[in-house]
Image (cartoon, rainbow, N blue to C red):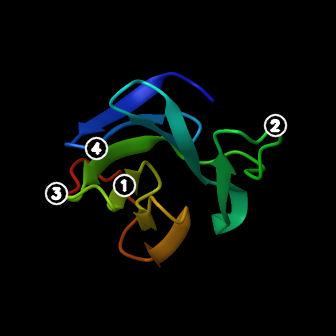
Amino acid sequence: AGLPTALAVNSRFIAVGNQGGQVWVFDLFEQLKIILGEGGGGSAGVKDANSVTSSVAGSAAAVTSIDLSLHGDFLLAGYGSGHVVLWDILKGAVLKRIVDLHSSSISSAR
């Protein structure tokens, strides 16, 4: 998974991005709820906190920035590859992925 590289907090969740391209989402009781991941080749993977197998394969760029929506339903993640991904945290689904914006690291997601 790698070392932590980004952090965001709101009234429902704590999100921690790491060098491996994953975002670990915890509730405020520090219970892991879901792992959102940017997999190799631009594919996205989701691992439920109760799952024993990861659906994220390959290496991914580090998560460089995270922002959570006010009510906590959505998470925006920026990656070292320049990709930006909008996640639905509750469903564990990618709502939007932008891969052709630019090739520089995303330093802030708001």
Quadrant containing the N terminus in the rendered view:
top right
Query: In this rendering, is residue 60 above or below 89?
Result: above
Q: Is residue 99 visible?
A: no
Q: Position of residue 105 (x, y in %)?
A: 35, 51
Sequence-first tag of 1 and 2: 2
Q: Quadrant of residue 16?
A: top left
CB contact under 8 Å: marks 1 and 4? no
Q: Which residue is mark 2?
A: 52
CB contact under 8 Å: marks 2 and 3? no
In the image, which is nearer the foreground, mark 3 or mark 4? 4
CB contact under 8 Å: marks 3 and 4? no
Circle 3 packing at 10 Å, graded few (<14), some (14-19), many (20+), is few
The secondary element bearing badge 4 is classed as loop
Q: Position of residue 38 (x, y in %)?
A: 59, 55
In the image, which is nearer the foreground, mark 1 or mark 4? 4
Q: Label 1 vs label 2: CA separation?
A: 26 Å
Query: In this rendering, is residue 30 above or below 41?
Result: above
Q: Is residue 10 visible?
A: yes
In the image, which is nearer the foreground, mark 1 or mark 3? 3
Image point (53%, 66%), residue name: 91
Q: Name the residue at the right extreme.
A: 53
Q: Amino acid at mark 4?
A: Arg
Q: Which residue is mark 3?
A: 70
Q: Name the residue at the front extreme.
A: 29
Q: Amino acid at mark 3?
A: Leu
Q: Amino acid at mark 1?
A: Gly
The secondary element bearing badge 3 is classed as loop
Q: Which residue is mark 1?
A: 78
The secondary element bearing badge 1 is classed as strand
Sequence-first tag of 3 and 4: 4
Choose between 89 and 61: the one closer to the eye: 89
Q: Which residue is mark 4?
A: 12
